[in-house]
Amino acid sequence: MSSLILDSLEIEGFRAFEHLTIKRLGQVNLIVGKNNVGKSCLLEALQIYARRGSLETIRKILASRDELGEKHERTAEVYYIEAIKYLFHGRKVFEYPRIDTFKIGPVSAANLQLAVNTQWYEETIDPESNRKTWEPASGQLPLIEGADNFLPGVRITFGKELAISNLRFLDIRSIRYSSLRRVEGIACTFVPANSLDGNTLTELWDNVALKPGEEDVLKGMHIIAPEVERINLIGQEHRSARIPLVKMRNVPEPIPLRSLGEGMTRLFGIVLALVNAQNGLLLVDEVDSGLHYTVHPALWHLVFKIAARLNVQVFATTHSWDCVRGFQQAAQEIENEEGMLIRLERRQEHIVPILFDKSRLSIATRQELEVR
């Protein structure tokens, strides 16, 4: 088996999770459960973890859920204070002097844990070096409100590395760091439920075109349409992003990929994202979206094989029983690779995971585990 990036996962204080502990993960992980149990939240936490608290990633996640809202007449600080609360369990308003924190990482591995917290900071200037520094604010709130040198901030740590940013980071214009040595993240590609946009497809395709990954993408297309011979992305005057075209056997002219149906477009995006995630994570929300039930076993076979070869750890969500069945079939047939089915379940105020490894997957399918 390839080495796992995460052999376990602990999420504390992030969105739906007051404290979630998954003690064991596989190379390929399929997450199921009813609505509002945190399946998409788990993928968001993994995105933030892989990118080591990337400010741009956090902003994109908030924007994707319409949590940035409208600025109107609010100050920048108030606007972002109201937005950042959505990342924290309970959605508490960012108030002085309380410090809100969420943590993501493997179980019992402090050196590999990402922590993000919010608090107020005081910006001062060192008289000798004339350099600006940030320190946690002290004193009474009336002294802080309206003062130019007191600002709400986000503190990001990974292991011993530290970054502090003014909350205006969500504008991606006025990022300021203190005592930071950049921490490199790991490769991470995310495929949303509504598939990848044209610009992302173009970027991912350019990374694999005329390379071994192109053959993997072609194999993915053959799951639905074995007559596909070639794929390319072509620019058009009226489009900002290039569009995928396919050359079909015995068809003289290339045709748009979308003309072959939603399933082909979805399959193209998933396999393209997978080969771009070498030595990293592939995250797919509602992996079954647009795919006929007969496609699932072959897709999972391909995912298991490519993930093992490229050392990709896969996390996908689904509401489809056919998808679970296809996953179980592939996991049982492929030797030496670990597939894990993770059911998230709400018990009173807590969300708990129920794990089904390869040895227990057949039990889950025989009992027709509830996934919706």
Image: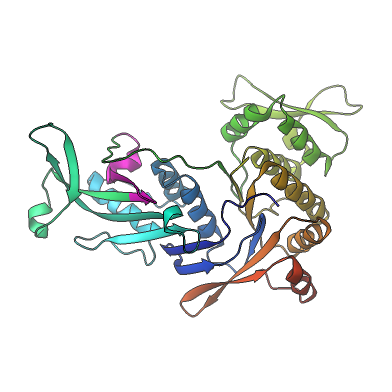
- Tell me: residue 89, above or below residue 233: below
Q: Which residues are magenta?
A: 156-173
Image position, residue 92 (x, y; %):
31, 64
Answer left or right for 124 relative to 241.
left
Q: Quadrant of residue 251?
A: top right
Query: Which residue is at 46% across, 52% downward?
Result: 65
**View extreme (top): residue:** 237
Q: How is the image coloured?
A: rainbow
Q: Is residue 22 left or right of residue 366?
A: left
Estimate the x, y position of residue 8 in percent, counting from the top left: 56, 61
Name the residue nearer the viewer: 154 or 37.
154
Q: Is residue 250 visible?
A: yes
194 or 166, nearer to the observer: 166
Does the magenta segment cover residue 89? Answer: no
Q: 325 and 180: which one is in front?
A: 180
Residue 21 in the figure: left or right of residue 232: left
From this viewpoint, which residue is outermost toward the bottom? 348
Q: Is residue 112 above or below residue 213?
A: below
State the quadrant of the C terminus. Answer: bottom right
Count up the numbered dots.
Answer: 0
Q: Is residue 73 visible?
A: no
171 in magenta: yes
Residue at the (69%, 73%) spot, across then down:
370
Can you give x and y, in whole percent of width and height, for residue 96 in the image?
A: 19, 60
Q: Is residue 209 above or below residue 223?
A: above
Please report the residue visible at 61 percent of the width from the left and 61 percent of the height from the top: 25
Looking at the picture, tell me which residue is in the foreground, 335 or 80: 335
Residue 39, how many percent across, how many down? 56, 61
| Residue 214 quadrant | top right
275 with respect to 89 (left or right)? right
